Image (cartoon, rainbow, N blue to C red):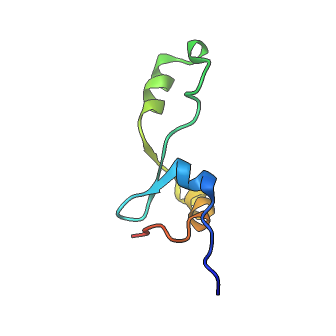
Amino acid sequence: MPKMKTKSSAKKRFRFTASGKIRMKPSGMRHGMRKRSQSMKRKARKIGVMSAADARIVGPTMPYSKRG
């Protein structure tokens, strides 16, 4: 059986935590900052943990990542 490939787009955007959750940067911080509220910009600075439903979609795209 050949090796499975990791999606390049996923490995650039997501990381696994030690417990197996997926860390991600919130969207919406590339351009157009003037129209965004200050609270939204503050919240989007932090690295977040992906919801379980989304993690089930992203997880299989990185087959060899460390999962708790």
Say above or below: 6 vs 37. below
Percent x, y for residue 66? 42, 68
- In the rendered image, the quadrant that contains the N terminus is bottom right
Percent x, y for residue 2? 64, 82
Say above or below: 67 vs 10. below
User: Which quarter of the figure has residue 3?
Assistant: bottom right
Percent x, y for residue 59? 56, 64
Percent x, y for residue 29? 55, 28
Q: Residue at x 63, y 69 (%)?
A: 5
Furthest toward the top, the residue is: 34
Q: Residue at x 39, y 70 (%)?
A: 68
Q: Residue at x 54, y 49 (%)?
A: 12
Q: Nearer the viewer, residue 14 or 26?
A: 14
Q: Nearer the viewer, residue 22 or 37?
A: 22
Say above or below: 39 vs 13. above
Say above or below: 26 vs 11. above
